[in-house]
Image: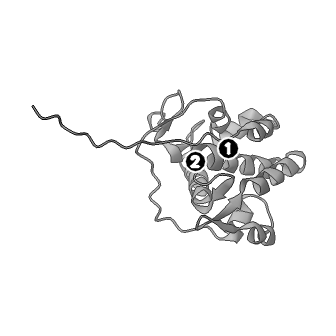
Amino acid sequence: MELERRNTKKYTFKCPDLTELKKLGSMIVSPEDFRAQYGRLVGILKTKVEVSDKLPFNGSEKTPTPAAIAEAFHLKTSVVKANFITKGGILGLTSRFLMDKAFIFAEADIYAFEAIFSLLIYGIVLFLNIDDFVDVNVVRIFLIGRIHRSSVGLRGSCPLIKGIYIGMTPPMMLE
């Protein structure tokens, strides 16, 4: 009797240090307002995540310009351009740059703080590709999700990551 050989692939997942991200999370002034604007992202920092193979992002969306990124995150376009770098052949922003801006905005501009904090969760927890780097695809996914949430009006969920279930009812079942 001949044994059948299976083709299996080994996947490894990065485990980033979330210490500073959790510090930023503790600086949220109004958790209810944050949840209404960005969904249940803060809970992701404390939850084990199961990943499905069905994500509604297909990569055909346009790459956001530094001006669009600056507007979305309440930054100056010149600052975004100066910190928009290529790492591993991919454009993006360093996590350190975004962390520094988030800590600054935590005291000065709650909307900018929450937007940057949310982007950091996307880049460090949900879609980590390159260590200490939030690539332009993550920014694109984040911006698409913000548009989708405001137009569809899903409450307390992150519709753009419908394939990620965080110990709660999947967002597509909330409608």
Q: Amino acid at mark 2?
A: Arg
Q: What residue is disc 1 on? A: 37
In the image, farthest residue toward the top: 167
Residue 23 image point, x, y percent: 80, 37
Q: Is residue 8 left or right of residue 4?
A: right
Give how far across and how far down residue 167 sits, in percent: 53, 27
Residue farthest front in this picture? 1
The foreground one among 15 and 35 is 15
Q: Is residue 4 left or right of residue 19?
A: left
Q: Secondary structure at mark 2?
A: helix
Residue 114, position as x, y percentages in the image: 75, 46
Of residues 144 and 81, which is closer to you in this image? 81
Q: Residue at x 80, y 68 (%)?
A: 79
Q: Amino acid at mark 1?
A: Gln
Outermost residue toward the right in this view: 107
Which residue is located at x 69 percent, y 52 percent? 132
The residue under label 2 is: 149
**Which one is nearer the viewer's eye here, 19 or 165?**
19
Sequence-first tag of 2 and 1: 1
Alpha-carbon distance for marks 2 and 1?
A: 8 Å
Dot 2, crowdedness within 10 Å: few (<14), some or many (≥20)? many
The answer to whether 89 is drawn above or below residue 57 in the figure is below
Which quadrant of the figure contains the N terminus?
top left
**Other-residue count near label 1 (Cα within 10 Å), few / some / many at <14 / 14–19 / ≥20:** many
Residue located 79% across and 48% down the image: 113
Q: Please tell me whether residue 104 is drawn above or below residue 75 in the rendered image.
A: above
Report if the CB atoms under discs 2 and 1 are less than 8 Å apart.
yes
**Model colouring:** one colour
